[in-house]
Image (tube, helix red, strand yellow):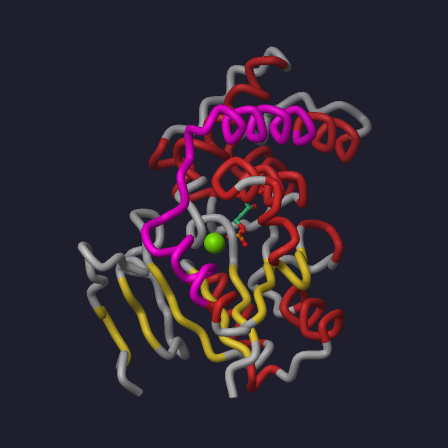
Amino acid sequence: ELRALIFDVDGTLADTERDGHRVAFNRAFADAGLDWDWTVPLYGELLSVTGGKERIRYFIDRYRPDFDAPQDLDGFIAALHAAKTRHFVEILEGGAIPLRPGVGRLFEEARQAGVQLAIATTTTPKNVEALLVSTLGEDALDWFACIGAGDIVPAKKPAPDIYFYVLEQTGWPAEECLAFEDSANGVRSSRGADLKTIVTINDYTRGQNFDGAALVVDQFGEADAPFAVLAGDAGG
Ligand code: XBP
Ligand code: MG
């Protein structure tokens, strides 16, 4: 019995990273008078670290070892990240980032079939809300039985904690749920919680290791643009 679909957000529901998060980070750096510039290829490397605050900290350690860090480094990173969130929400509210093909249809068909929906993501809750509202309207927030996001669990993906959190909150047994992810870190997280997982790749995650995924496709597809199966068995 299929009871619920649990979705990752960034890269799965929408291509938010390159033209959304990355740009928002750079705007926050500029606001703070920093000359840091996260180019498209550099950002691809930084994506190995999930979570925006964690990503900034990793960048400083790895790429700016001589940075004259303020004494309260945690506070500095938190403020920088809050500015980044404001910029990201502004980008979404401007309507710049659509849902990926087939996502709206999947939500619709699940709701009509009485299959429940939830979110499991490392991104900030405000970002999830802004994406859902800007693409689907205010009512869409009520479609989700649980929105597990951000710092609600201390260990971000690839740890399975955010999926365990959603399963705990909803009471759904893992074997009655299906997870949707776009990245290796995401699959490690969902598989760590024993969830059957479907992967939709994107330009940043193509070629990553999706061992354990039930199915890998290039997109969810629409009637006029069917998805292509890259691994797994759509019928099985
Ligand atoms: C993707 C991420 C996120 C965003 C940034 O998470 O790694 O960290 O890039 O989000 P997922 P914040 O695919 O699980 O949604 O800056 O809000 O942390
Ligand atoms: Mg993702």
Specify whether 165 is left or right of 227. Answer: right
Residue 164 appears in view: yes
User: Relative to 161, is 71 above or below?
Assistant: above
Q: Nearer the viewer, residue 153 or 176?
A: 176
Does the magenta segment cover residue 102?
yes
Question: What main secondary structure does the magenta stretch of the protein show?
Answer: helix
Q: Is residue 10 magenta?
A: no
At x 42%, y 50%, the residue is: 11
Which residue is at 56% across, 24% downward? Answer: 90
Percent position of residue 122, x then y: 61, 52
Magenta-highlighted residues: 81-109
Relative to 228, is 173 on the left or the right? Answer: right
Q: Residue at x 61, y 28 (%)?
A: 84
- Residue 143, compared with residue 113, is above or below; it is above
Towards the viewer: 12 or 224: 224
Residue at 57% over, 16% down: 34
